[in-house]
Image: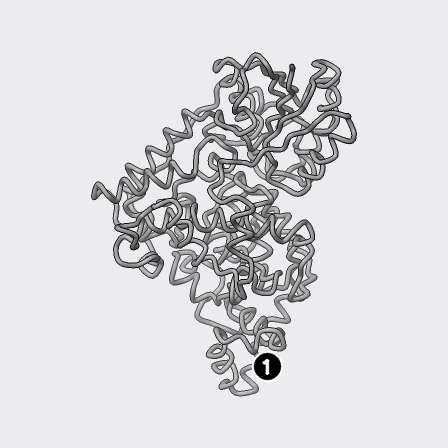
Amino acid sequence: MTTLVPVLGDQLSLDLSSLAGMEARDFVVLMMEVADETTYVRHHKKKIAYILSAMRHHAQALVEAGYTVDYVRLDDPEASDSFTGEIARAIARHDPERIVVTEPGEWRVAAMIESWQTLFGLPVEIRADTRFLCSHREFEDWAAGRRALTMEFFYREMRRKTGLLLDEGKPAGGQWNFDKDNRQPADADLFMPRPLRFEPDAITREVLALVAERFADHPGSLEDFDYAVTAADAERQAASFFANALPDFGRYEDAMLRGQPFLWHSILSPYLNSGLLDPLDLCRRAEAEYRAGRAPINSVEGYIRQILGWREYVRGIYWREGPEYVERNFLDHRRDLPAWFWTGETDMQCLREAIGQTLATGHAHHIQRLMVIGNFALLAGCDPKQVHEWYLQVYVDAYEWVELPNTLGMSQFGDGGLLGSKPYVASGAYINRMSDYCGTCAYNVKERVGPAACPFNALYWHFLDRHRDKLGDNHRMALTYRNWDRQDEDIREGILAQARAFLAGCA
């Protein structure tokens, strides 16, 4: 019996569930580069190049492991544009008796796969993605009956399930969460760790040429492409992070510095989300660094929380809330994204830094995404679906299941508080405290009105004022609204006029 096993571009794991329990001689692995997946949004050039190169290298790894691989390249003149079209062609080539596939990460692809049995008249077995630590059923059971789906409580359950950072059933270090210790700004440091760089090999160079020719109008740059594209090189990057950056990761995980896109961050999320690295393995290795005394508890707990907590949690939210989640717009924000989101050409130094490095590298860390770019988009009233699509396009690690809840929900408050109990908004003072961006900015972070005033300051109060009907009863924002009410009326009107003038010229 021949079985067809499609392996998608974010399923680059040798221990994938669809490969389990069968003899290699009994099935054909189908890997597909298809036009629809590269263009359903205008993905960053580096994102396309990373995925295609990683896929081609993974196909080699599968062959070396003894599997038969049918690989369809994007530039194959007979290739179709879709997964479903390639399944049809593969059925004609191999005449399989069934299809076995690991569940996809996105609703859009799930709908395609669920149609195959009817379209092709073959049994289609969709297996759970065992690379995740919380199944859909487990998340549903955890969420059932809860008034609030607070990530912190989910995270604690995942710690108990895995045993990570537990001492006789209690949290290591005496508390579950050390986030309060992880908010220090950083200074430029000649000895700051640097992630490894990987020179493109022949396969990657071929992919880069293809992307340059075929996706010239997509955002971002292909210059200095240095991502790992094999499991072995992704592992080298992980080992470098644990040895050199993890000890100070926690302390400086919210810090931002001009010209420093990486700081103490791991830069492992592209490899984790595409399948080259295993999440539980990374968490266990981080814990081992703590147990061996090589990394402090705040760094290790903070790192594990990002994977075991947020990553698993947002996946659960994505699948629980359904494909309509993307349309939510609790604050009724309708403004288009400014054109400079595609160039980084703005006088606001913080946004020029964060967007500029995003377009150059396909990377920005979580505070740049949340408290600089996302903060501005929320304060300015940008359409959350447009914001979501921008993030999905420009980041190499962005897949809808992880990006959508983080962006539309956490960053833009589009779900009305399902993910976050209050909007993540801040004035320029926060950015000034956590970065060195403001010192070279054309605007003065300490001014609220006037031609030199930092736009974040007036936009912050304008946001709160115009959404008082929806946010005024939020207990976490009561003090902020009291501070606003204490201002003289003429001061408040001056601030609101400053914000309106800025927004009128923001396009």
Query: Left of 446 or right of it: where is 467?
Result: right
At label 1, the amino acid type is: Glu
Q: Where is residue 430 in the image (x, y as percent from the top left)?
A: 43, 64
Which image quadrant for residue 228? top left
Q: Residue 294 versus residue 369: which sits nearer the camera?
A: 294
Which image quadrant for residue 244? top left
Q: Residue 237 versus residue 501: which sits nearer the camera?
A: 237
Residue wearing tag 1: 493
Query: Left of 185 or right of it: where is 405?
Result: right
Confirm whether residue 199 shows in the render: yes
Quadrant assignment for the N terminus: top right
SS type, badge 1:
helix
Q: Where is residue 252 in the image (x, y as percent from the top left)?
A: 34, 52
Q: Position of residue 414 (x, y in %)?
A: 62, 61
Q: Where is residue 382 in the image (x, y as percent from the top left)?
A: 64, 60
Confirm whether residue 455 shows in the render: no
Q: Residue 382 versus residue 397: which sits nearer the camera?
A: 397
Query: Left of 331 or right of it: where is 239?
Result: left
